[in-house]
Amino acid sequence: METRMMALAVLSEADPARKAAQATQLRADFLAGAPLDPEAALTPTLPLPGRPARPALKEALQVPSRSPFTVEGRAALIHAICHIEFNAINLGLDAVWRFPGMPRAFYADWLQVAAEEALHFSLLHEHLQTLGHHYGDFDAHDGLWTMAERTKDDVLARMALVPRTLEARGLDATPPLQAKFRKAGDERAVAILDVILRDEIGHVEIGNRWYRHLCLARGLDPVGTYARLVQQYQAPRLRAPFNLEARRQAGFSDEELAYLQG
């Protein structure tokens, strides 16, 4: 099957383990030469994204924060990260099928992102099970997919506000999370977050690169355009502290970092 059509089919898959396995296979098939039609206009036939009946999705403020210093609290925290990674698989796949007319490298990049997010989800879910829980056992919120819905009609807005805004928050949040898990004696969680942070720097860099590509193609100033898109799409206001080193590695310019801190 054609790659972008297959990405839509995998996005529609509701079972998380099957979705993760299929996203990994989809990228392998693409690298092995599966056909890709950048111009195809595709139409979903199933609700998007495919997701299991649980976790129950709540407003962010309705999901309680948990302490990592009890097994249950640590499981809830791992579950919250697991849910972010499940959503991130969906976001990678959505970028592949939804936006026609992009260069082949764009689809290659987002297939890579989806496959790496699938690995992250699988590592976290495996660890969650050692704490006596499965994905779906705790309530979760849906902020990442909400922004995907808002930006579904403009690839520029998607690149600006999902990878380089919401996913970039993970660069800031991961080191403090690792410190909590280390203090709680959960070295496996620390090691998994090392893998996630390394890969997420790459994912945010992909978002930055395609955002700049699109700004250049449309004759737009990246910094001014970003400020306009934040307002237009009601993106969350990012708050310090920022992981400036990781953000620089992910391709943010000094001017962009200054805007962020201002």
Image: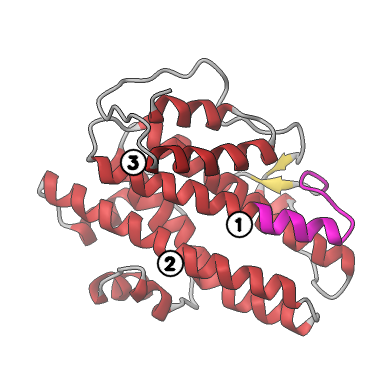
The percent position of residue 43, horizontal first and vertical second, equals 42, 17
Residue drawn 35% across the image and 62% down it: 205
Name the mark nearer the viewer: 3 or 2: 3
Q: Earlier in the sequence, mark 3 or mark 1?
A: 3
Q: Position of residue 216 (x, y in %)?
A: 13, 51
Disc 1 designates what residue?
120
Magenta range: 122-137
Task: Give SS at disc 2.
Answer: helix
Residue 262 appears in view? no
Quadrant location of residue 1?
A: top left
Q: Give whichever of 140, 22 is nearer the camera.
A: 22
The residue that appears at 52% across and 69% down in the rendered structure is 197
Mark found first going from the N terminus, 3 or 2: 3
Q: Are discs 2 and 1 less than 8 Å apart at CB? A: no
Distance (Cα) linking label 2 and label 1? 14 Å
Q: Which residue is mark 2?
A: 201
Under tag 1, what secondary structure? helix
